């Protein structure tokens, strides 16, 4: 860690401002095709918990569902300091783990799939229409976690993901591409979060 990185780390640790408990990283399938992409992921796993996160969610947006099995296999082999849960399209089990990896076709698809699941349950008589609320919708999302901080590398857009979950999150965009992310980019995101006054949509 260089001098500037140590300076940022000290500012974070000795600040009175809180660090985010729940951090999300938004990636695309293309990000993970770059050389060194999984090394970066392993490093981010370490940084997240070193700098105060209790939960880290990684959202991977894919264009073709056929890519999901390969990504699952590769992501399952990544070293991590905490338990990892991987969830993708068609998975309906509740998953709880300090590190959650979600693979999906984007936020619109995820939300539409949740509504379709609710409609099937209503049609089967398992759920009354009046029982449908935010909690019921969130239970059917790939991962229902609502992160405090969402980090997106490479561009100022969310790649059509986390439409529901990030509505009250703080968003941090960096022009640095995923393969080039170093600890200073992560520290800058945390430091930026500490400077903000959260309003939760108000």
Image (cartoon, rainbow, N blue to C red):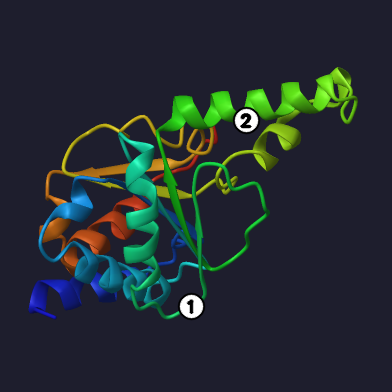
Frontmost residue, 180 versus 197: 180
Point 57% across, 67% down: residue = 97
Query: Considering the image in quadrants, where does the N terminus appear?
Result: bottom left
Earlier along the polypeptide chain: callout 1 or callout 2? 1
Q: Is residue 108 above or below residue 186?
A: above
Which SS class for mark 2? helix
Q: Nearer the viewer, mark 1 or mark 2?
A: 2
Can see residue 142? yes
Frontmost residue, 104 versus 8: 104
Which residue lies under the disc numbered 2?
A: 114
Q: Is residue 104 above or below residue 126?
A: below
Q: Callout 1: 10 Å neighbours few (<14), some, many (20+)?
A: some
Query: Considering the image in quadrants, where does the C terminus appear?
Result: top right
Can see residue 202? no
The quadrant where residue 140 appears: top right
Q: Is residue 154 above or below residue 132?
A: below
Judge from the rendering whether residue 50 lies leftward or rightward of residue 38; answer left or right: right
Q: Position of residue 89 (x, y in %)?
A: 51, 42
User: Cβ–Cβ below 8 Å for labels 1 and 2?
Assistant: no
Q: Position of residue 14 (x, y in %)?
A: 36, 75
Give me the disc on residue 82: 1
Which SS class for mark 1? loop
Judge from the rendering whether residue 35 lies leftward or rightward of residue 187; answer left or right: left
Judge from the rendering whether residue 3 lies leftward or rightward of residue 122; answer left or right: left
């Amino acid at each position: 860690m260089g001098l500037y990185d140590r300076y940022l780390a000290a500012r974070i640790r000795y600040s009175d401002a809180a660090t985010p408990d729940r951090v999300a990283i938004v990636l695309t399938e293309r990000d993970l095709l770059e050389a060194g992409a999984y090394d970066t992921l392993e490093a981010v796993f370490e940084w997240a918990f070193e700098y105060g996160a209790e939960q880290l969610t990684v959202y991977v947006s894919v264009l073709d569902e056929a890519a999901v099995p390969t990504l699952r296999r590769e992501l399952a082999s990544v070293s991590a300091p905490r338990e990892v849960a991987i969830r993708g399209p068609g998975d309906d089990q509740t998953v709880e783990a300090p590190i959650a990896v979600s693979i999906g076709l984007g936020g619109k698809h995820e939300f539409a799939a949740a509504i379709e699941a609710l409609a099937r349950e209503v049609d089967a008589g398992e759920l009354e229409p009046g029982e449908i609320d935010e909690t019921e919708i969130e239970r059917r999302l790939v991962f229902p976690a609502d992160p405090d901080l969402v980090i997106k590398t490479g561009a100022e857009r969310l790649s059509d993901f986390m439409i529901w979950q990030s509505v009250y999150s703080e968003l941090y965009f960096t022009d640095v591409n995923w393969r080039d992310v170093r600890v200073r980019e992560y520290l800058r995101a945390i430091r930026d979060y500490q400077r903000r006054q959260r309003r939760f949509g108000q």
